[in-house]
Image: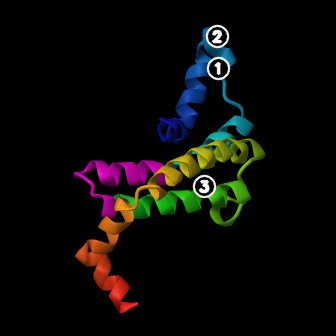
Amino acid sequence: MIADALRLQKELGQFVWMRPEVHTLQINENEWSILQQVAKVLKPFCDHTNSVSKSCPTIVESLPIYGILDDLLDEVQRAEGDFEDVDTEIRDAVERGIQKMNKFARKMDTNLLYYVASVLDPRIKLSLIGS
C-alpha cells in the first residue's frame, strides 16, 4: 500500500487539494520522505514473503531468509549500507523488530531440528562438504 501511495503521490496530492473536507490529510515532503524510507526497509520482507508464499516452503528454504532479514534489520538500526539515510524514528521502530526476531531465534536455537534438517538436506550438505 505504501508503494502504491508513493507511485501515486502526485494524484493523491491533487485529490486532497480538490476536496476541502480532506485537506488535513495532505502529506508533506517530510512525510513522503519517511514513507520512502519505510518502503525501502519493508521491501525485502515483502519480497521474501512472496517468494515463500508461492510454494510450500521447507525449513531449509526458510532458515536462510531469517538470517538475511536479521542482517537487514541490523543494517537499518546501525544506518549502514543502503540505510544510511534512515531517520532515527524508523531505526527505533526497527529495534522492536530486532527484539521480536531475537525472541524467535532463541526459540529456534532451543530446537536443533531446524539446523539438523538444514544439514541433512543434500543441497546444503554438499555445499558444507565442499567448503
Give the residue at the far bottom of this rendering.
130
What residue range appears in magenta? 44-61
Q: Residue 20 carries which label?
A: 2
Q: Is residue 67 left or right of residue 99?
A: left
Local packing at callout 2 (Cα closer than 10 Å; few below 14, some 14-19, many 20+) is few
Q: Mark 3 points at which residue?
A: 73
**Residue 45 lies in the magenta-colored region:** yes
Comes first in the chain, label 1 or label 3 = 1
- N-term mark: 1 or 2: 2
Q: Given the image, on which type of amino acid does mark 1 rest? A: Leu
What kind of colouring is applied to the model shown? rainbow
Q: Which of pointers 3 and 2 indicates the residue nearer the eye? A: 3
- Mark 1 neighbour density, 10 Å: few (under 14) some (14–19) many (20 or more): few
Identify the residue position indicated by label 1 in the image: 25
Q: Which circle's residue, 3 or 2, is located before the other in the chain? A: 2
Which class describes the residues within 10 Å of circle 3: few (<14), some (14-19), or many (20+)? many
Which residue ends up furthest to the top in the rendered image?
21
Q: Distance between the residues labelled 3 and 2?
A: 40 Å
Which quadrant: the C terminus? bottom left
| Label 1: which secondary element | helix
